[in-house]
Image (cartoon, rainbow, N blue to C red):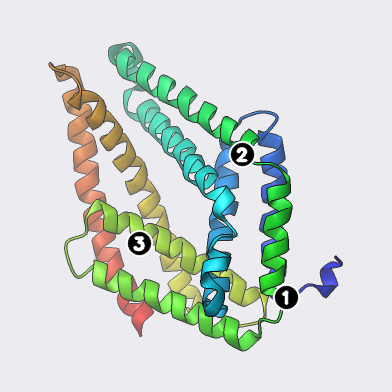
Amino acid sequence: MEASTLPLVLHVFDKHYDAGKVLFEELSKKMKSKKAIELEAHLDFFSVYIQLLERVHFNKKKKIGKIFSPFKPLQKNLRKVKHIRLIEEGFINHMLAEKGHYSDYGKLISSDKDRVYTEVYELILSVPLHQWENLYRDIYKFSQGMSILNINTAINQIINEEIDYFYFGTKTKLDAQTISDIYKGLKKVTALEKIRLSIGLNSVFTHVVHQEIDTLSKKMDTWYKNQLLLQHLGSHLGKKEDVSKKYQPVLTLLQKNHKELTLAIDTKCQQLFTKMLH
């Protein structure tokens, strides 16, 4: 199909689809964490695009929701690759200077990494290439006939729901789940804004607000990395009958970081979401 004949809204999907398919084929030959993390980002975009289609064709929501089914287990497990990679980076930053001191934990990370990578590689081999063709065919079919008006309405509805959730979430004490949900929600809002721009619509939010979203997302990246290491290490130590005192300084630092980052995110959320609502 000639690119010029495709609806404008499909052009942005095409870029993610083409890049994702290339990464998928490369990963089927050799597992590489960097490429797996990149593929997860493209699959996340597919999820957002499908939510948009569901909103436009609300009477066919169930049918459209099934389009992505063959890729959901892969998406979930690719996220685990990112998680173990971030845990490993945290281990290197906080414990590598005394690697021998924490050799038991280093071995656990290595073992978890091997298991996660093997599971993802097997999943990639289990998804036939024709599933990619099916995905594109269905996306193309449901992208036909969408007007600028109903795309605009659907995007505004989704973004407004996200902002309402953000605002509600920050009215109570921010917990790990709420921060994680807001983090995903901000990524969704950014993806939807890119779709708007691709079809000639103005951005919902100003450039200044988008800069603040970017700043908050980076702060959440740091929080997320700290949180993953804190959870993983906590789980490891929780299984031991006798926890060595050597871990206490690391745990204390991670808990201190968690408290400070959560407070900083809370403050930033209050400022940003008030602006986004008005």
Report if the CB atoms under discs 1 and 2 are less than 8 Å apart.
no
Disc ID at residue 35: 2
The answer to which of marks 1 and 2 sits earlier in the sequence is 1
Residue marked by disc 3? 182
Kind of residue sitting beneath label 1: Leu
| Image position of 103 with respect to 126: above or below | above
Q: Quadrant of residue 168?
A: bottom left
Q: Nearer the viewer, residue 11 or 71?
A: 71
Which element type, helix, strand or loop, lies under badge 3?
helix
Q: Residue furthest bottom?
A: 149
The answer to which of marks 3 and 2 sits earlier in the sequence is 2
Residue 173: image location, x then y, percent = 17, 61
What is the spatial separation of the Cα atoms under label 1 and label 2, in whole angstroms?
28 Å
The answer to which of marks 1 and 3 sits earlier in the sequence is 1
What is the spatial separation of the Cα atoms under label 3 and label 2, in whole angstroms?
25 Å
| Image position of 51 with respect to 87: above or below | below
The answer to whether residue 161 is left or right of residue 173 is right
The answer to whether residue 85 shows anywhere in this view is: yes
Disc ID at residue 8: 1
Residue 6: image location, x then y, percent = 78, 72
Kind of residue sitting beneath label 2: Lys
Q: Nearer the viewer, residue 124 or 106?
A: 124
- Residue name at image x 19 percent, y 70 percent: 171
Q: Nearer the viewer, residue 73 or 147?
A: 73
Kind of residue sitting beneath label 3: Ile
| Image position of 161 with respect to 261: above or below | below
